[in-house]
Image (tube, rainbow, N blue to C red):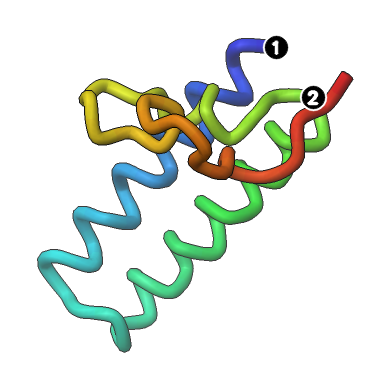
Amino acid sequence: MPHRIRAARAAQYLAVRALTVHGLGHPLTLALLAAASTAAARAWEAGHQVTDIHPAHTASSPRAHPGAAPYGPRRP
């Protein structure tokens, strides 16, 4: 279900844009943050990992450091 990942990324992008433009207290920002969290929860429930939504692109990512804890529990 890659569409759930795309939906979560798009919702997060829109929420960050609204946050940048309007600030945290604006009703549009709050609505978009709620939509982003719902989309991320649906992707998680569909079996996707957090790293599917937020892939690591740099050497400073948690998986790059030995002994670093992963984001959330690993699923079998």
Q: Where residue 51 appears, x then y in whole percent?
A: 52, 28
4 vs 38: above or below: above
Q: Nearer the viewer, residue 23 or 48?
A: 48
> Which residue is located at x 33 percent, y 33 percent?
61
Which residue: 48% across, 22% down? 6
| Mark earlier in primary sequence (1, 2) | 1
Q: Residue 57's quadrant in the figure?
A: top left
Q: Which residue is tagged 2?
A: 47
Q: Is residue 5 toward the left or the right of residue 61 in the image? A: right
Report x, y in % for residue 54: 43, 32
Image height check: is 31 above or below 60? below
Q: Nearer the viewer, residue 72 or 31?
A: 72
Q: Describe the element under mark 2 as helix, strand or loop.
A: loop
**Front label number (1 vs 2):** 2
Residue 24, compared with residue 49, is above or below; it is: below
> Which residue in the structure is indicated by mark 1?
1
Instruction: Determine whether label 1 and label 2 are within 8 Å by CB.
Output: yes
Quarter of the C terminus within the rendering: top right
Q: Secondary structure at mark 1?
A: loop
Residue 40: where, in percent of width, then height? 61, 43
Give, as a three-letter code, the residue at label 2.
Gly
Q: Which numbered marker is on residue 75?
A: none
Q: Vertical placement of 74 versus 19: above or below?
A: above
In-image side of 40 versus 55 (left or right): right
Report the Cα–Cα distance between label 1 and label 2. 9 Å
Q: Residue 26, located in which quarter of the rendered image?
A: bottom left
For mark 2, does the 10 Å Cα neighbourhood hold few (<14), some (14 to 19), or many (20 or more) residues?
few
